[in-house]
Image (cartoon, rainbow, N blue to C red):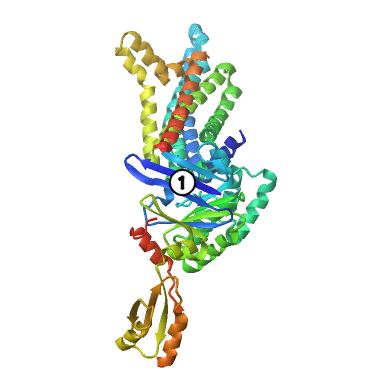
Amino acid sequence: MKNIWVITKKEIKAYFTSPIAYVVITVFLVLVGFFFYSLIWWFNSQSIQMAQNPYYYQQININQMVYSPLFHNMSIILLLMLPLLTMRLFSEEKKIGTEELLFTSPISVSQIILGKYLASLIVLASMLCLTGIFSIFTFAFGNPEFAPLLNGYLGLFLVGAAFLGVGIFFSSLTENQIVSAILTFGALLLFWILNWASYSAGGIWKDVLNYLSFFQHFDNMTQGILDTTDLVYYISFAFFGLFLTHSVIQSRRWR
Amino acid sequence: MIEVEHLTKKYNELVAVNDLSFKVEKGKIWGLLGPNAAGKTTTMRILTGYLPATDGKATVAGYDVFEQPNEVKKIIGYLPETLPLYLEMTVSSYLDFVGEIKQIPPSKRKEAVEHALKISGLEPVRGRLIKNISRGFKQRVGIAQALIHNPQVLILDEPTIGLDPAQIIEIRQLIKSLKGEHTIMLSTHILAEVTQTCDGVVIINEGKLMASGSLEELTASFKEKEGIIVKLRKGGEEVASQLNKIPGVEKISRENNEFKIEWSQGRDLRDIITKFIVEKELGLVEMRPVAMNIEDLYLRIVSGGGEQ
């Protein structure tokens, strides 16, 4: 555990001594802020209209009308941003030759991978926490339900964790950071839209494709539904990414 | 301290290291010598546990490199060919990080960093970012990270490459000062480095062992003839033929007024030659033994002249 933390500390320092973390976090917050603002604006105008009808008045729900679409938008932004956080993790070490230092130290490959992964998770968590500031306004001026909100954030964190797992894998494949980012982005997008293909697929394939798609699982979580299937899906996705990273690094050395 | 037995490393079809065996004694500095692409870096990478071998055995301080890699990694300090530096860190924070991953306990780490900074002469640049310091200082940071945890064994891949002559001398002195306490193996293709810093040498070419042993042993085993070089005031073919008449002399070669006189091993003609020169009044200016130097040795071995 101590060894993992050494690597994590180093990676977090590296994120914040280079502009990358600042740029990613700022752009993320600006985009989320924009979506939040326009959703609140839309919600306000809808509420005024709906308030005139007693039936619709019952239906006004800030969780459904603001947070659910906001979480969807945030997950797409994460899909665009997180490959930029993972692209350098192994590519850079390989390119500048520091992996020779790491792999000849008395730290195991799994510890190195976990340390790096943990650092990227911490940056992800801080990105998400910072967006919590927006919710101060909704809680101050409205009464959103807290549990679904938290569930949505948990969903975002898990989706992000899965994205980071994929990203770290592609980072171990190449010493070119751009290539690593593009491959991660492509793979994530593919898994995102996998359920589109399920519309035309039949039988068991429909279920398989639906299960594999990020979208399907994330949809539940933004609705406030916490299902263990979804938790297992994201955690195993992240774990699989880390496992593949380990295999790539080991096989590269054994080749 | 370091023992390598029948080590082989193949990259697909390419054989980088081929059935290599050698030993390095404790507290000595050994050079790993060979032309480019001879397999020096691969050998060192295997010893440090960075690369696995295809076949064979390697032990460092009694630990098997393949069976107990973590034990080996704890007692080895390694300077790779490309300096493993994080350019965005300052010199001291980098050394602190290396100390941490080399598992120096927190209570001793600060002291270890100070010690490494001091012996590598890095104190003037300790607070600067590594990307902003000169190549010579970067090289020293590389050496400092290799010895920060006071390892029993130091493996240095081309430690003086890319340095100016003054820096080369400093680094060599630094390496020599580490001898005794540490067992050092350094690779190089600069022959002078071997004669100036090393106690022994392993010469490899195309992955194969060409020769290994202490410098004295090697030069002795390759020397077929003994001889001296005399510089005279008088010169010319005539003098050469006169010298050739001395009983026992087998070969005379002349370059202006310098004569290289050689005879077969086991005899000593120095007295006779001096007497002859004085008697004939040839005007002795200088007299020195013919030393088999490392260049001759290396060229003969690598060109295949003396495989053993």
Please tell me whether mark 1 sits on a helix, a strand or a loop.
helix
**Percent x, y of residue A116:** 52, 36
Q: Nearer the viewer, residue A84 or A39?
A: A84
Q: Quadrant of residue B71?
A: top right
Residue B16 vs residue A132, the one in the foreground? B16
The residue nearer to you, when weighing A66 against B284, is B284
Q: Is residue A173 visible?
A: yes
**Which residue is situated farthest in the right direction here?**
B107
What residue sits 48% from the left and 46% below the top?
B4
Which kind of residue does numbered mark 1 sit on?
Arg
Q: Is residue B267 above or below residue A254?
A: below
Counting from the top left corner in percent of width and height, residue B305 is at 34, 60
Q: Is residue A7 left or right of residue B305?
A: right
Please state the chain letter of the residue tagged with numbered disc 1 in the rendered image.
B
Instruction: Name the residue furthest front.
Output: B247
Q: Nearer the viewer, residue B268 or B187?
A: B268
